[in-house]
Amino acid sequence: MTGGSGLANNIVEVRGIGKQYGPVRAVEAVDLDIPRGQLFGLIGHNGAGKSTLFKMMLGLLAPSSGHIRIDGEAVEGAGFRQVRRKIGYLPENLALYDNLTGLETLAFYARLKDAPQAQCATLLEQVGLGEAGRRRVREYSKGMRQRLGFAQALLGSPALLFLDEPTNGLDPEAIRGFYRQLRELSAGGTTIILTSHILAEIQERVDRLAIMKNGRIQADGTVQALRESVNLPLSFEVRMAPDQIELARLALATLPLAVAAGEDGVVRFSCEREMKMKAVEALATLDGRVLDLHVHEPTLEDVFFGYAEGRHEAS
Ligand SMILES: Nc1ncnc2c1ncn2[C@@H]1O[C@H](COP(=O)(O)OP(=O)(O)OP(=O)(O)O)[C@@H](O)[C@H]1O
């Protein structure tokens, strides 16, 4: 692909994009630069605005405000037509004709996209539908439909892939295989943008994440950078004999912690990272009366909810 304005590294440039549906602000003031070859994950809960942003980047939906350039071409401009041919898209709900076989389905999309027919059988093999390609889509499971949709997105060997909830309906093994293929494509220079609300699934598998909430990008960076920027507290679970719970409270009373004790005999509190060793020392004074101790590190899920609760001031 060649950039119309000869620009550099970023294949996607989004500036101040917004979309209003009546009173609903689906997307608001989004800026995003995505370098070529990056595997980029867009995360958010239902209704966060991910699909709307996708559709605007694909030129399928006109923004209410802002500008988008893909490979240097404004999506609303005439030059985008050429660029569009090198984009693969797996929509959240791909329409499939039940009466066609998998192979016929791909052949149909290949004609629409002007992609080589010879690619169809190869792609079906690649997504694990080699045999099933001869069966009608009516007989396909949800996961098989999703694989077929992925094959459709790969027609024409696109330089840029948009995948909206691509692992929906895939089993864990299929998910592993799917990300392996994404890595290979990315290593070959394909830029991949995918959405998900399963944070645990994508956190170690993408180069970069953006977290979207209420139409805005709340955070953007590598998993490591996101964790570091939020500095979520550790959570402690201290199991005591039921009649010893007050002792634990007393031992921790000198520290500024909100301690809660459950009926299960477990004392729980969260603790800033810097205070971890002080908390451990306080518990050590209990002299063997602690039956069990767990310290939980924050996960990316916690990071996400940390943002959701406004712990982080979005830059
Ligand atoms: N055609 C439409 N008309 C009116 N409101 C819409 C339309 N499409 C989306 N919305 C609203 O815009 C907001 C963002 O929706 P969007 O589908 O982009 O979110 P999403 O992050 O993709 O969610 P999901 O994970 O559920 O797919 C929601 O409040 C939704 O109800």
Image (cartoon, rainbow, N blue to C red):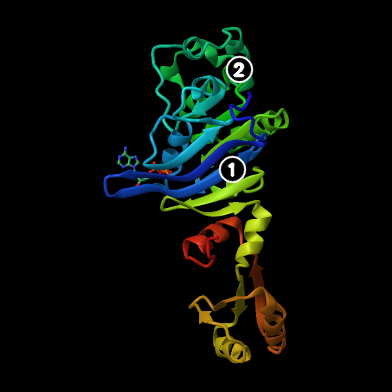
Q: Secondary structure at mark 1?
A: strand
- Mark 1 or mark 2: which comes first in sequence? 1
Residue 17: image location, x then y, percent: 45, 44
Residue 165 visible: no
Quadrant in which residue 35 is drawn: top right
Figure check: 305 above or below 45 = below
Note whether residue 11 is visible.
yes
Quadrant housing the N terminus: top right
State the CA–CA distance, disc 1 to disc 2. Answer: 30 Å
Under mark 2, the amino acid is: Leu
Q: Which residue is mark 1?
A: 33
Residue positioned 60% across, 17% down in the render: 123
Image: 150 above or below 164: above
| Kind of element beneath mark 2 | helix
Image quadrant for the C terminus?
bottom right
Identity, as a three-letter code, of the amino acid under mark 1: Asp
Residue 155 percent coordinates (x, y): 57, 18
Q: Residue at x 43, y 26 (%)?
A: 94
Is residue 47 placed above or below 264 in the rendered structure? above
User: From this viewpoint, which residue is outermost toward the front?
Assistant: 5
Please state which of residues 14 and 296 is positioned toward the viewer in this rendering.
14
Q: How many numbered marks does the figure carry?
A: 2
Residue at image point 54% right, 16% down: 132
Viewer-side label of 1, 2: 1
Which label number is shown at residue 195? none
x and y percent of residue 220 in the render? 58, 52
Residue tagged 2? 123
